[in-house]
Image (spheres, rainbow, N blue to C red):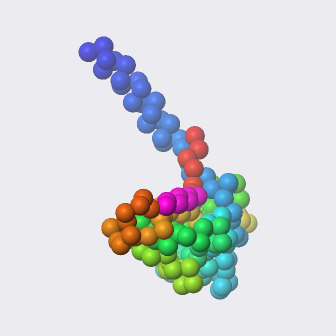
Amino acid sequence: MPRLGRLVPALCAVLLLAACSTLTVRHLARAPWSVAPGQSLDMKYWRFAYDVVQLPDQYGVRGRALPTPEVPDWVSFASDLWFEAYLCDEEGQVLARDSRVYQARALDRADGVPFEFILKPFPPQGRSARLFVTFGYSMNAADRAPGGPGNEAPARVFFASESALSRF
């Protein structure tokens, strides 16, 4: 029983920290929230071209993500890929977010990857509050699809990620 006596306070401390944590994107590039068509935001490895759409009681963000020139030319296949859209305030505190996970795919540099996010209503910020949008991503990519021809030698691997951070 002495272990249980130490475990309960430790578990309570972890739960308290988790309840007090917030997500922040202040380290990421952000664009002012706008419903104007034809917006874009350049991140290190992905460029997000998007439109904001007003839906009943929520907002939609849809468009295409295109790899930037920072992604090496030899990268041709993404085996693990996800994108997130974040709505945040001036300090970078995340007010709403949505995620999309993609199946393994060839990396099409010209056409990119289509996305669509739904951002649920966020806490009232007052009429003068400035809001921003940004994106997160994680990509595990290689020079070829796994299991394909020419797999005698190990594949070259490339990893890129930018996303929200938890702040306590």
Tell me which secondary structure the magenta stretch mostly adopts. strand
The spot of residue 146 in percent (x, y) is 37, 66
Q: Is residue 5 left or right of residue 53?
A: left
All told, the count of numbered labels is 0
Q: Is residue 64 visible?
A: no
Give the quadrant of residue 53. Answer: bottom right
Against 79, is 13 above or below?
Answer: above
Residue 77 pos. (x, y %): 46, 71
In reply to whether residue 124 is colored magenta, the answer given is no
Residue 73, how many percent across, how many down?
A: 59, 72
Residue 27 or residue 98, whichever sits in front? 27
- Whether residue 157 appears in magenta in the rendering, the answer is yes
| Side (left or right) of 165 relative to 32 | left
The single residue placed furthest to the top in the displayed view is: 2
| Residue at the image position 66 percent from the left and 59 percent from the top | 28
Residue at x 48% of width, y 68% of height: 143
Q: Which residues are magenta?
A: 156-162
Reply above or below: 24 against 167: below
Residue sitting nearer the eye, 65 or 119: 65
Q: Residue at x 58, y 58 (%)?
A: 162
